[in-house]
Image: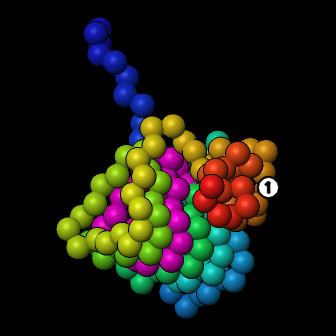
Amino acid sequence: MLGKKKQKPRRPHGNFDTLISSRTTIKGDVHFSGGLHVDGQIRGKVLAEDGSDAVLRISEVGEITGDIAAPHVIINGTVHGDVYATAHLELAEKAAINGSVYYNLIQMAMGSSVNGNLVHQREPSGLLTQDNLPADEALENPGLDESSEYSDGKPE
């Protein structure tokens, strides 16, 4: 029809390519694209491929101990680590995050909790934009650079 703009389709939240079941524990980093649904436990970083429109969903029985970096993140379980959601972060009523949260858009249900900093970012930064560093180094020193005022670890 004339005068109507086409809306960009949203990433469907019901189609997930990979399922980590409640009886599964993964020790090590997970790199993914598409949809990843976690009912089990991951002990390591969870990183979406650069440039992907990936979705990570953690159910109420799911648990991740490590940092997360993905465009779309839906949490209803437990995360021990920092969360970098470049597009959208949804915290359901049983979500518990022990770490800092870096987000563009956030939706929090009553009952969800964050024990750490909430940092709003319009432009992606942090894990996903440290192109010159390997992923391991980016996680070890997110946001730090050589010109820090604490060059020797002590305030001047």
Image quarter hosting the C terminus: bottom right
The one of 1 and 52 positioned closer to us in this rendering: 52
Which residue sits furthest top?
Answer: 2
Q: What percent of the width, then of the height, locates residue 139? A: 67, 62
Q: What percent of the width, then of the height, locates residue 96? A: 37, 75
Find out whether residue 109 is within the magenta segment: no
Element type where label 1 sits in the image: loop
Which residue, given by chain and number where applicable, does mark 1 sit on?
134
Q: Residue at 59%, 74% (x, y): give it.
A: 66
Which residue sits furthest left?
Answer: 110
47 vs 98, left or right, is right
Which residue sits furthest front?
Answer: 156
Q: What stretch is highlighted in magenta?
A: 70-92
Q: Residue at 29%, 16% (x, y): give it.
A: 4
Image quarter hosting the N terminus: top left
| Rendered position, 61 above or below 142 | below
The one of 86 and 137 positioned closer to us in this rendering: 137
Confirm whether residue 38 shows in the render. no
Predominant secondary structure, magenta span: strand
| Rendered position, 52 above or below 56 | above
Q: What percent of the width, then of the height, locates residue 25? A: 62, 87
